[in-house]
Amino acid sequence: MAPFFTFGGLFYWQDRYAYADWKIQENIWSKRCRILDAYNVCRYLGTYAECRERLNLFVKNWELTVPSSQAVVILPGIYRGKRKFTRMIDEFKSANFEVIFVSMPMLRYSVKEKAEALDKLLSERPDLTTIHFIAAGTGGLVLRQAAALPSVWHDKIGRSMLISVPNNGLSWATKKRTKRWYRLLFGNMGESLLPSKAKKIPLMTGEFATMSGGKGDGSRGFIPFFKGDDDGLLTPKDMKHPNAKADFLITGGIHFTLTRDKRAIEICKQFIIFGYSNKKRGRKDSKLMNFLIDNDD
């Protein structure tokens, strides 16, 4: 077949296997699979077994570099494609991590379905020894659900950063859930964004931190009718997680651009590589990070 460009499968494809920037995706309707290279170019179509066999040939014939046994898995939120994370992906690759950007049907799958798909994806990589996570938006809810599954990769979880994750749901979602635009905008993820539903998703454990945006000056945030600060979509109360080792605030950070912010990326990189031993140290290092943020050139 002749190769052709794709958009990476944002709505109707789910990742089944990922290796060295290549991946196998399965169509949620036809169950037909395809191989995408590092540039989202489709190289082959067939069954999952056929794609696995063909991908092994690509790895051998194209002499793809064997990836690191330590991976950083990026879980995007709704409407966030790979482009939103390009700078972050490059930073972690330069630190010798394998970076796995996970694509799943944004609106067709619920949090539970996405968590199960993530479980299957990571279970296909027994060669990985450590798996770190960067989860943005609803991707954080998926991570929380997946981390609670009895997975074969659970003991390999390293450090995680939750960026603008509605850990307690959207404070305004309950009033808007019956609106037609709400259902169209959030699809099957909409129910999980209700505070009553989001709080039922198992909490994260282990070494992880949260990051949020906002004005950070004690004034109103970016949305006038919200009380207190906000990042243009979520309030600090929406994002709060009681088990986080550290909580970072990117002053002036906006919800949908935070994953491209140089300051945010640097904090993510330092946390994934070095981590924090306890909450007390996390608070101290958080002050240091705020100093770096305020004096960034």
Image (tube, rainbow, N blue to C red):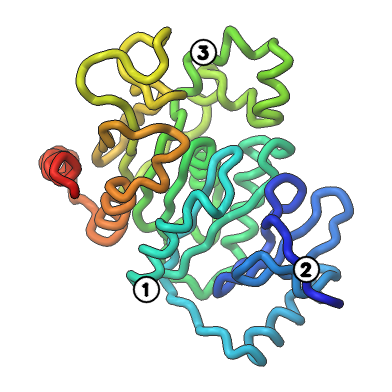
Say whether residue 114 is visible: yes
Residue drawn 68% across the image and 84% down it: 58
Residue carrying label 3: 172
Residue 181, located in which quarter of the rendered image? top right
Measuring from the top left, give residue 191's x and y in whole percent.
64, 23
Q: Residues within 10 Å of mark 3 (few under 14, many from 20)?
A: some
Question: Mark 2 and mark 1 in contact (Cβ < 8 Å)?
Answer: no
Residue carrying label 1: 96
Residue drawn 47% across the image and 53% down it: 85
Residue drawn 18% across the image and 47% down it: 296
| Front-lying residue, 236 or 246 | 236
Residue drawn 42% across the image and 7% down it: 225
Question: Mark 2 and mark 3 in contact (Cβ < 8 Å)?
Answer: no
Mark before the other along the chain sequence, 1 or 2: 2
Q: How many marks?
A: 3
Q: Is residue 166 left or right of residue 5?
A: left
Tell which tag, 1 or 2, sits nearer the viewer: 2
Measuring from the top left, give residue 98's x and y in whole percent.
46, 69
Q: Is residue 274 left or right of residue 112?
A: left
Q: Amino acid at mark 3?
A: Trp
Question: Mark 3 and mark 1 in contact (Cβ < 8 Å)?
Answer: no
Quick one: SS at disc 3?
Answer: loop
Mark before the other along the chain sequence, 3 or 2: 2
Say whether residue 280 is visible: no
